[in-house]
Image: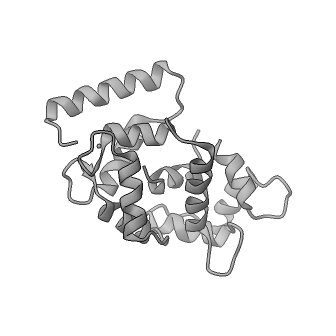
Amino acid sequence: MTSPLAKLYKKISKRKSESSEKLQVAEEDEARTSSSSGGSSLNVDELRDVFEYMDTNSDGKISGEELQSCVSLLGGALSSHEAEEVVKVSDMDGDGFIDFEEFLKLMEGEDCSDEERRRELKLAFGMYLIEGEEFITAASLRRTLSRLGESRTVDACKVMIHGFDQNGDGVLSFDEFVLMMR
């Protein structure tokens, strides 16, 4: 079962083309087939929900501006230049946007170097932090989940953190976050 922390990472993790409805359905079917037969733990329906959440104008594509806005809504900071770079790196067909197929590839981590993955994880980790803190606390997790419309008690957040807290200090360090995201 995917933890709310992992779901949030998927929602904010950054990484394609105008398609007819028929093509989109075919792409979704292909993605479902490859996810179920390829042993991927990603749920295509959940990823579709995340994609639609980020695609604020419902045009079937995520622009740099939409990406920047979503990250900002979640309490993070992404410059327009950084958002455009993310789109450029993820844009396989060169249309300047991320479509659902490209989004799936991004979420599956295809063509992603270890350094790039670490940068993405660092950005995601930062979304959970309260200014001045270096760890994900139960309060910061609760705040971030609340921004996503998933209300949790501080106690429930403590339980979530406990599942990945290797040193027993009650918070998640970046290294513990990285392990959780594997």
Question: Extreme right residue here?
Answer: 167
Asked whether, in this view, residue 131 is left or right of residue 84, the answer is: right
Residue at (33% x, 56% y) in the render: 54
Residue at (42% x, 37% y) in the render: 105
- Quadrant housing the N terminus: top right
Question: Extreme top residue here?
Answer: 37
Residue at (74% x, 54% y) in the render: 176
For residue 122, what is the image quadrant? bottom right
Way the structure is coloured: one colour
Residue 5 percent coordinates (x, y):
58, 54
Residue 147 percent coordinates (x, y):
46, 68
For residue 104, what is the image quadrant? top left
Q: Number of callouts in the render?
A: 0
Asked whether, in this view, residue 8 is left or right of residue 141, the answer is: left
Residue 27 percent coordinates (x, y):
28, 29
Is 67 situated above or below 163? below
